[in-house]
Image (spheres, helix red, strand yellow):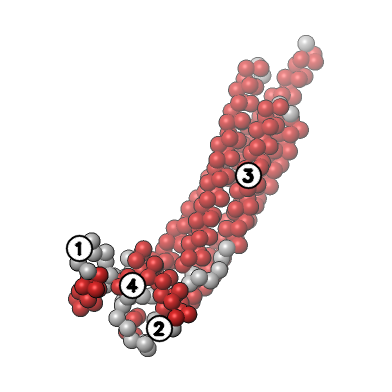
């Protein structure tokens, strides 16, 4: 292969690895967001963080390996490129393992979240000062996801203590009226969100999980492209060296 062609592959691999490093940062960010959602929606209990933690570790490894691939391509070293290929194969295997584990554990994680959400809702109805953190937790969920209770506003009056739904169950009112008047109007007219928070929370977490899976699949394709480029460049460097020896 002509030197010009080899240089094109070399610079293409360097650019590829630079993009790869950026995508490594993205997969870390996506895993962190998913971890934050699991933590924030599980009633302040930690659950299902293991696969996200592994993904973060994989993201860090991707950044390191991409930097190594840039160095190997720039130095035109077949040995470094072969090591780079081996590391990419290892990353692909790790990503596949994490993806399979995440898919297998997801139903269990969602079941645990349901249990924790229901338990935290009971504490949300408590008037004890030490349970105020649960009231803040549910106010945040109901306000952000526009939902009310676990399965609906009736959850507030279905068991002791029987309470009116929280003001966070009321749609946003941007009028200039006093908060007390807005709250009284919402309660008297039952203008609460009718959809329960359980389904919305699980839907949000499910969407975040799909984002992680899509990122993983995208990375596998990119990594395979990187493997092809690295092997192509290593082969070109060897052939170029042989042609110079016989010249």
Q: Position of residue 10 (x, y in %)?
A: 63, 26
> Viewer-nearest of labels 1 and 4?
1
Asked where in the image residue 53 lies, by quadrant, the reply is bottom right
> Viewer-nearest of labels 3 and 1?
1
Residue identified by numbered label 4: 148
Q: Secondary structure at mark 2?
A: loop
Asked where in the image residue 7 lies, by quadrant, the reply is top right
State how far apart marks 4 and 2 are (Cα).
18 Å
Q: Secondary structure at mark 3?
A: helix
Return the residue found at the far right.
245
Q: Position of residue 9 (x, y in %)?
A: 62, 26
Disc nearer the start of the sequence (1/2)? 2
Pointer 3 and pointer 1: residues touching (CB < 8 Å)? no
Q: Position of residue 170 (x, y in %)?
A: 27, 70
Disc nearer the start of the sequence (3/4)? 3
Q: Position of residue 113 (x, y in %)?
A: 49, 71
The dot on residue 176 is 1
Return the residue found at the far top.
247
Q: Residues within 10 Å of mark 4 (few under 14, many from 20)?
A: many
Q: Quadrant of the C terminus?
A: top right
Q: Residue at x 26, y 66 (%)?
A: 171
Residue identified by numbered label 3: 62
Disc nearer the start of the sequence (3/1)? 3
> Viewer-nearest of labels 4 and 2?
2
Residue identified by numbered label 2: 127
Disc nearer the start of the sequence (4/2)? 2
> Viewer-nearest of labels 3 and 4?
4
State how far apart marks 3 and 1 are (Cα).
52 Å
Q: How many marks?
A: 4
């Amino acid at each position: 292969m002509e030197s010009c062609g080899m240089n094109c592959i070399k610079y293409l691999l360097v650019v590829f690895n630079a993009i790869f490093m950026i995508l490594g940062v993205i997969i870390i960010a996506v895993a962190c967001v998913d971890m934050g959602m699991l933590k924030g929606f599980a009633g302040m209990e930690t659950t299902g963080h293991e696969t996200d933690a592994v993904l973060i570790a994989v993201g860090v490894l991707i950044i390191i390996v991409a930097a190594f691939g840039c160095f190997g391509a720039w130095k035109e070293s077949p040995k470094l490129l072969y090591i780079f290929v081996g590391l990419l194969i290892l990353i692909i295997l790790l990503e596949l393992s994490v993806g399979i584990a995440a898919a297998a554990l997801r139903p269990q994680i969602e079941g645990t979240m349901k249990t924790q959400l229901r338990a935290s809702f009971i504490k949300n109805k408590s008037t004890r000062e030490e349970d105020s953190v649960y009231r803040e937790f549910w106010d945040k969920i109901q306000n952000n996801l526009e939902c009310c209770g676990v399965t609906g506003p009736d959850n507030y009056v279905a068991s002791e203590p029987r309470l009116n739904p929280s003001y966070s169950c009321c749609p946003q009112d941007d009028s200039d009226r006093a908060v007390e008047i807005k709250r009284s109007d919402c309660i008297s007219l039952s203008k609460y969100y009718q959809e329960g928070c359980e389904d919305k929370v699980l839907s949000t977490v499910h969407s975040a999980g799909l984002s992680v899976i899509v990122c993983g699949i995208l990375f596998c394709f990119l990594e395979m492209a990187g493997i092809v480029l690295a092997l192509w460049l290593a082969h070109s460097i060897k052939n170029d060296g042989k042609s110079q020896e016989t010249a």
